[in-house]
Image (spheres, rainbow, N blue to C red):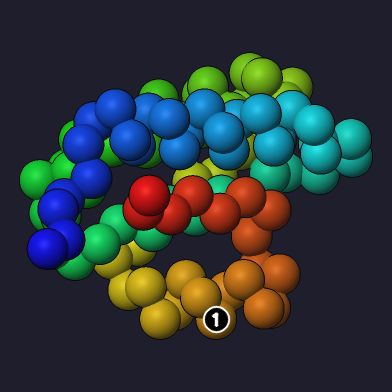
Amino acid sequence: MTTAPTSFSLLRTGLVALGLVCACATSLADITAIVAVEPTAKKAAHTILRSQMEAGLGKAAGQTTSVTVSEDLADVMRATRSAGYDVFIGPA
């Protein structure tokens, strides 16, 4: 039985990503992040405030940040191989 991610699991995943950004962000280029949301978790996807995530990641890293939210898990998995994003946040 698969359950939808809770707000806590999304927050936990976001904090892990924030830590990775802080640890890895040493260049002055923009940081790009993608958040993969399960298509069955539409309610959870609507609770993600992209602008606040961009502001938080950007403040922590000291760089401008661009966040994309996607429900297409296949495209997100392809993006991991193409290095299209600096940070990947996925369902727990």
x and y percent of residue 63 in the render? 72, 30
Q: Residue at x 43, y 30 (%)?
A: 12
In this rendering, position of residue 53 left or right of residue 33:
left
What residue did someone put label 1 on?
Answer: 78
Q: Secondary structure at mark 1?
A: helix
Q: Amino acid at mark 1?
A: Arg
Q: Name the quadrant containing residue 75.
A: bottom left
Q: Is residue 77 visible?
A: yes
x and y percent of residue 11 in the render? 37, 28
Q: Quadrant of the N terminus?
A: bottom left
Image height of 27 relative to 90, above or below: above
Q: Residue at x 16, y 50 (%)?
A: 4
Q: Residue at x 21, y 36 (%)?
A: 6
Q: Is residue 49 visible?
A: no
Question: Which of the two residues, 2 or 11, is positioned nearer the viewer here?
Answer: 2
Residue that lies at the very extreme toward the front in this rendered image: 1
Image height of 2 relative to 55, above or below: below
